[in-house]
Amino acid sequence: MLKDVTLGQYLPGDTLLHKIDPRMKLILTVIFIVSVFLAQNLWALLTMALLSLALVFISKLSPKVVFKALKPIIFVIIFTAVISVFWKTGEGKPLLSFWKIKIYKEGIIYALLVAVRIIVLVLGTNVLLSYTTSPIALTDGLEQLLSPLKKIKVPVHTFSMIMTIALRFIPTLIEETDKIMSAQRSRGADFSNGSLVKRAKALVPVFIPLFASLIRRADELAVAMECRCYTGDNGRTSMNTLKYKARDILALVFSLALAVGIFFISKYTGGYSF
């Protein structure tokens, strides 16, 4: 399960999606998220789902790798869908009635739409941002987008660096955790059987070496940055200057048009709605 977590992984490529300016990708990701929440009925949500699949096709990423990101959140999707079943009531006869619990057809449809919304949200944001943008480019893009905040003494560079390092080390943290758990299993540790309390106690021997490894890695990273004369934002220059190109502007226009289209589809078309 840990190996299925792909958050923070960058998959190099030479596609149009990889070449879009990282600043524009951050803006496009925000517009995409807003568009997903603007999708208030079946047709609008299907449009966003098709867009997510189109992004996977354009990025030329393996669908197996992309959909792998859904495995760690399957429980969250199922739990949210189950809760949503009871959130929507209907006017007709319930499909199932037990004590005070009533399940309507509208509730089941609503739960399916909520599950699809979560899946579209995860797939789209991962392909737009994480999988197709290197950590260095993401840092530069985030820093330049937030640069106006420097006028009010906000440490934009530090914030951007912290965010990027955190994302970059998520795969490393997962790999380290998996190695430690494998080592503990070889010594007889059992993480899958027994009561919840017993399984929680079995994780204690994992957390101690994991925290020790994290502290050691943080210290090594700090030493490496000092050896390379890293001084933060003071006097820092960039080897590659970010410049918006025609494809970035076209992507922005398309995204804004899509958001407006999703709004009108949700408002003026029929079908099951949230």
Image (tube, helix red, strand yellow):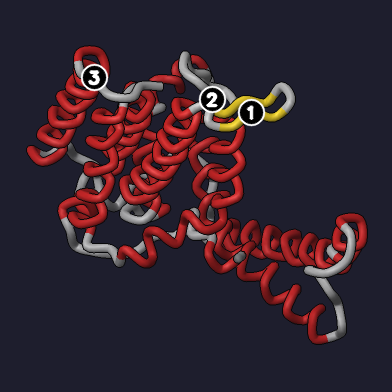
Residue 31 to residue 270: above or below: below
Q: Amino acid at mark 1?
A: Ser
Q: Which residue is mark 2?
A: 94
> Residue 220 is drawn in which quadrant?
bottom right
Q: Position of residue 79 (x, y in %)?
A: 61, 41
Q: CA distance from mark 3 to mark 1?
A: 28 Å
Q: Earlier in the sequence, mark 2 or mark 3?
A: 2
Q: Position of residue 229 (x, y in %)?
A: 53, 55
Quadrant of the image for the C terminus? top left
- Classify mark 2: residues with Cα within 10 Å, few (<14), some (14-19) or many (20+): some
Q: Secondary structure under badge 2? A: loop
Q: Amino acid at mark 3?
A: Gly
Residue 178 - label: none
Q: CA distance from mark 2 to mark 3?
A: 23 Å
Q: Earlier in the sequence, mark 3 or mark 1?
A: 1
Quadrant of the image for the N terminus? bottom right
Residue 234 at least partly seen: no
Q: Which residue is mark 1?
A: 97
> Residue 151 is drawn in which quadrant?
top left
Residue 175 to residue 76: above or below: below
Which residue does the image show at 46% across and 29% down from the upper left?
A: 105
Q: Which residue is mark 3?
A: 270
Q: CA distance from mark 1 to mark 2?
A: 6 Å
Q: Secondary structure under badge 3? A: loop
Q: Position of residue 133 (x, y in %)?
A: 34, 52
Q: Position of residue 30 (x, y in %)?
A: 35, 30
Nearer the viewer's eye, disc 2 or disc 3?
2
Q: Amino acid at mark 2?
A: Pro
Residue 42 to residue 274: above or below: below
Q: Nearer the viewer, residue 257 or 207?
A: 257
Which residue does the image show at 78% across and 69% down from the upper left?
A: 192
Q: Are marks 1 and 2 in contact (CB under 8 Å)?
A: yes
